[in-house]
Image: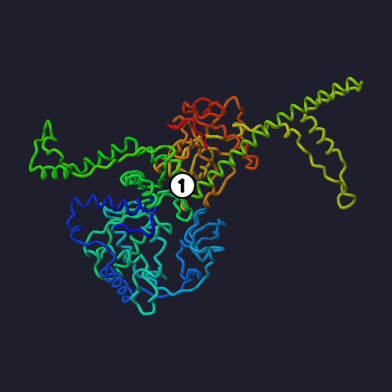
Amino acid sequence: MPYVNNVPHLGNIIGCVLSADVFARYACPRIFREPYRFLIIFTTNLHFFRIAQDIFLKLHENGYTSSSSIDQLHCQNCDKFLADRFVTGICPFCAYDDARGDQCDSCGRLINAVELKSPKCHICRQEPKVRQSTHIFLHLDALQDVRKYVESEIAKPNTRWSSNAVAIVKGWIKGGLEKRCITRDLKWGTAVPIPGYENKVCVLCVVRRSDRISFNYEVSLVQFHRKGLSCNDNVAFHGVMFPCTQLGARDNYTIVNHVCATEYLNYEDTKFSKSRNTGVFGDNAKETGIEADVWRFYLLYMRPESQDTSFSWDDFALKVRCYEIYVYVECLRFQLFVQVSARIRSQCGAERLPVFSAYPMSYLKPGHKIGTPKPLFVKMESAKVAEWKAKFGGSALTNDLDKKRKGELCNRLDNCLLNGSESCHSMIDAIQKQLVEAETAAGIKQVPVPSIHPATVATEVKQANEKKPTAAPGGGKKTESTSVVDISDAAADDAVDVGRLDLRVGRIVKCEKHPDADALYVEQIDIGESAPRTVVSGLVRHVPLDQMQNRLVVVLCNLKPAKMRGVESRAMVMCASTPEKVEIMEVDPSAQPGTPVTCPPYTHRPDAQLNPKKKIWETVAEDLKVNADGYAVWKDCPLLVGGSTKMTAPTLRGVPIK
């Protein structure tokens, strides 16, 4: 049974609402039609409140609750305690200035609202004060039977718990079951039925579970969830908290036996955020004028079953006008064919139809309708898509555009400086030539500039330093030490080109998700060294985990190591990239880890480590692209693996390599 709080965005809708609705529509024509018709299934009635309070009281009477005081942020201007999401401030971990009271969007760390620096009420922008409030806690540590229940459900050969739901619940239990607050300082909700707590209500982890059983004590419970922000709490609440309340009540309730969880649905290349006006919310979707069935199709198509997916306007426009619609309709048609056929036969008064009929539609009377058809596709003009992207992009889109403009300005400035330096050299040479001509005409003798080999000078300087007398130990005047400068270093080739990059073939020997970042993989890559290198890549949204295992890649090995959410990355996987799609560059299957990737005629002379201040990689990357034939090129010169085979992109053409 779905539930939402406030106006849902598309991620909320696909996670627990639309998924549950599709299941209900699937189930109703089969085994649940009559129970749903007969029962009045909603939770805003006294029967629901009585059951919620009954469970709460039995938990209290059975010794599974206690009271304790906690620190909370209270807004004096709004005269209420603030929920975590109604507080913003400076992140105590990374100093991001717009972190929420439950999680920082910049570093991803979970936050307690009272830990924020310079907190602000999201409603009135005033600074809230820390106040203590007494609440009731549920003793999860005393309800260890839930471990046996979870283990038995997971161990069933036909378990109805999705793999990500199992992982989340296991993580919760492994971390240890502790006391958890089950009341809140709110003015609406189910009142706490204990004297002294008249101004508090039961938290949703108890209330929203009891509404599932308020219409029938013996119904099989099926739950759909989107990953929550605080330790995936929606799943853990239904897989741990809800069973704990039922076990603690000791009333033999039906315990949830189907848990289906999804990963995150993101918006473009960022996250949905109501406060930042980023993303499409339910009311926005209605305002666009696009049919509901079109939204339903795309959200179901992009449902994040096992990994994060992203809502993209460009992809949305493409999908709703292409052949996937036909596949979707065909699947539904064959799934419901038996039932629809039975309904048609019943309406036509024909118990059985011939198996092979030349004109099957002749059995239908003229004008017969099964339902009202609606279009499942719509043509979206590019201008309209651009308008929607700008409207719902929020501050994230503005920041991206600002970064893009700054990048373009920097590139133009670099080009101007480069052209200007060449012009200056030409002008200096011309002026020098004019001066020489003028001096020669005036009778001034020109002394030729001697040609001196740098290595010879370095040797002579070194010999001269060795011949200098040194002061006697323990006395005499100290001699100033003269540092020897190796002038031969000045003659080193410092031209910025692709030859400065240490590109090698690597093989991913192990890949797993980053423990603290949903969009990142952590790979162990063999690049021909004594041990694999650890590499962090933002490929979760583009490449499934199973396709990352044991595959050949091209790796940039001489970047300065950088920590990404606590894990040090010592290289970078090369990919063909667009805002909507990323593909890992491919090499010949016979290539061996450690094989260098070069670009003749540019000399292969990789730096030991690229100096980030000199922007060598950034400069070279501007001309590193996939050409029209799918080959990796730098300034139209192909990159060669081992001096022979080419590095290719699977499908992308004319895009940058990053």
Instruction: Give the quadrant of residue 634.
Output: top right
**Residue farthest to the right?**
443
Residue 61 location, x and y as percent?
31, 77
Q: Which residue is mark 1?
A: 391
For the point 72% across and 31% down, the residue is 491
Q: Nearer the viewer, residue 193 or 274?
A: 274
Left or right: 381 in relation to 529: left
The type of residue carrying mark 1 is Lys
**Residue farthest to the front?**
367
Residue 98 location, x and y as percent?
53, 57
Residue 295 visible, this angle: yes
> Vertical placement of 122 versus 67: above or below?
above
For the point 31% across and 62% down, the residue is 148
For the point 57% across and 47% down, the residue is 562
Residue 422 location, x and y as percent?
70, 29
Q: Nearer the viewer, residue 92 or 508?
A: 92
Q: Nearer the viewer, residue 32 or 465?
A: 32
Element class at badge 1: helix
Residue 324 location, x and y as percent?
32, 37
Question: Which quarter of the figure is the N terminus placed in?
Answer: bottom left
Q: Is the residue marked by circle 1 packed among few (<14), some (14-19), or many (20+) residues within 10 Å?
A: some
Total count of labels: 1
Residue 520 visible, this angle: no
Q: Nearer the viewer, residue 320 or 482?
A: 320
Instruction: Give the quadrant of residue 431.
Output: top right
Left or right: 155 in relation to 121: left
> Vertical placement of 143 versus 451: above or below?
below
Left or right: 495 in relation to 457: left
